[in-house]
Image (tube, rainbow, N blue to C red):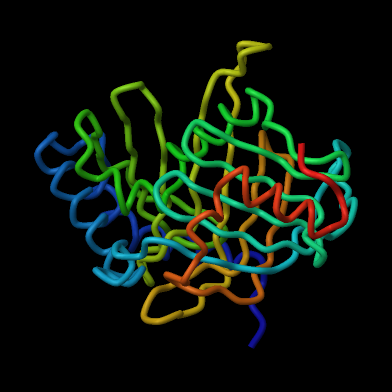
C-alpha cells in the first residue's frame, strides 16, 4: 500500500508524539546532576559490555591488516594503500605501508621514528605531538585505561541521531579540558561515532574531528569495527577497511624501536644510519 505525502506527514507526527514523552524524560537539561551521572554510568557500562566486557578491557595489543582510502582537499578519493598496523595499549603504534613494508612509522610514548627510501630518521615533533593527542582522544584508550584517571568526568549528553541510528551521547572531559563525545547505539549499545572539538592553533576557529565506526565483527568475544572513517569539519580525511585482526598477538620485543626499523632497512638493501 502506498501512502501519499499527507499521510506520511500524519504518520510522522504520530511517531514524534509517541516518542516525545520518553525524549523529554531523558532531556539532560531537565535532569539533576545526580541523575545525569547515574544515566551516564548506565550507558557506559552497557557500551563496555557490548564491546566484550572484561574480554574487551583486557586487550593489551592488537594487529590488523587492510586497506586505507585517502582523500584530497577536494574530497575526491586519491587512492588505496595496503597496510599492517600494530598497537600496544596505551601508547605504542607501528604501521607498515604497502605489502613490501618499505615505509614504516613507529611511535612509542613520546618518541617516534620513520623508515623510507632514505633510511631511518626521527619523526617530526609535530607528528609525535599529534600522536600523543590522538592517544587522549582514542575511545579504546578511554574505555580501557583512562576510566579511573583522576580529573576525568563523564556525563549524559542526551539522545540524538548519528549515521541513521538513535544514539545516547556520553560526554567526557578531562583535567586538561579535552572534550570527547561518544555516540552509543541505543539498540546494540555499540559505539557509533566519536566527536572531538578543539581550537585550531593557526586560525583559532573551532575544529571538529569525527570518527565513524561501522561493520562490527566479533573476534574472540570482542566486537571490532572493521570500517573506520575519519572526517574533519565535514570533510572526509581517510577511510580504513580492516580485512583481519588478531587480539593479543605474540609481538617481537623490539617491534616499537628504532633498532627494528634499522634492521628492516638493511633487509630492504639499504644501510642503517
Q: Is residue 16 left or right of residue 260?
A: left
Q: Is residue 140 above or below residue 111?
A: below
Q: Residue at x 71, y 57 (%)?
A: 96
Which residue is most to the bottom?
1
Residue 207 position by quadrant: top right
Indicate the position of residue 235 as horizontal and vertical percent values.
74, 40
- Residue 22's place in the image compared with 243, above or below, is above
At which x and y percent is residue 211?
Answer: 57, 49
Q: In front here: 1 or 201?
A: 201
Horizontal placement of 26 versus 261: left or right? left
Q: Residue at x 16, y 42 (%)?
A: 37
Q: Give left or right: position of 164 versus 78.
A: left
**Residue at 48% across, 70% down:** 224
Please state the horizontal and vertical placement of residue 12, each as a whole percent of the image: 50, 63
Q: In the rendered view, tell whether residue 163 sits above or below residue 178.
A: below
* Nearer the observer, 194 or 69: 69
Which of the 4 image quadrants contains residue 2?
Answer: bottom right
Quadrant (top left/top right/bottom left/bottom right) for the N terminus: bottom right
Quadrant for the C terminus in the image? top right
Pinpoint residue 145: horizontal percent, then vertical percent.
Answer: 30, 48
Residue at the farthest left position: 34
Q: Say which residue appears at 35% left-offset and 46% top-offset.
A: 142
Q: Quadrant of residue 54?
A: bottom left
Marks counted in the figure total: 0
Residue 130 relative to residue 115: left or right: left
Amino acid at each position: 500500500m502506498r501512502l501519499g505525502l499527507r499521510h506520511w506527514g500524519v504518520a510522522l507526527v504520530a511517531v514524534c508524539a509517541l516518542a516525545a514523552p520518553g525524549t523529554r524524560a531523558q532531556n539532560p537539561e531537565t535532569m539533576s546532576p545526580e541523575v545525569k551521572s547515574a544515566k551516564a554510568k548506565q550507558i557506559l557500562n552497557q557500551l563496555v559490555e557490548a564491546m566484550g566486557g572484561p574480554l574487551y578491557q583486557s586487550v593489551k595489543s592488537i594487529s590488523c591488516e587492510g586497506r586505507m582510502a585517502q582523500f584530497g582537499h577536494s574530497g575526491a578519493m586519491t587512492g588505496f594503500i595496503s597496510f599492517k598496523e600494530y598497537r600496544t595499549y596505551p601508547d605504542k603504534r607501528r604501521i607498515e605501508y604497502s605489502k613490501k613494508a618499505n615505509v614504516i612509522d613507529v611511535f612509542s610514548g613520546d618518541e617516534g621514528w620513520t623508515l623510507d627510501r632514505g633510511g631511518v630518521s626521527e619523526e617530526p615533533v609535530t607528528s609525535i605531538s599529534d600522536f600523543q593527542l590522538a592517544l587522549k582522544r582514542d575511545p579504546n584508550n578511554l574505555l580501557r585505561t583512562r576510566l579511573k584517571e583522576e580529573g576525568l568526568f563523564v556525563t549524559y549528553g542526551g539522545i540524538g541521531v548519528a549515521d541513521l541510528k538513535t544514539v545516547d551521547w556520553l560526554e567526557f572531559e578531562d583535567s586538561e579540558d579535552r572534550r570527547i563525545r561518544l555516540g552509543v547505539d541505543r539498540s546494540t549499545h555499540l559505539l557509533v561515532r566519536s566527536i572531538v572539538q578543539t581550537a585550531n592553533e593557526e586560525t583559532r576557529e573551532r575544529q571538529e574531528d569525527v570518527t565513524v565506526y561501522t561493520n562490527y565483527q566479533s573476534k574472540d568475544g570482542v566486537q571490532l569495527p572493521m570500517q573506520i572513517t575519519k572526517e574533519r569539519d565535514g570533510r572526509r580525511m581517510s577511510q580504513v577497511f580492516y580485512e583481519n585482526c588478531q587480539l593479543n598477538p605474540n609481538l617481537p620485543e623490539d617491534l616499537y624501536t628504532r633498532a627494528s626499523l634499522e634492521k628492516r632497512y638493511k633487509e630492504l638493501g639499504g644501510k642503517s644510519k
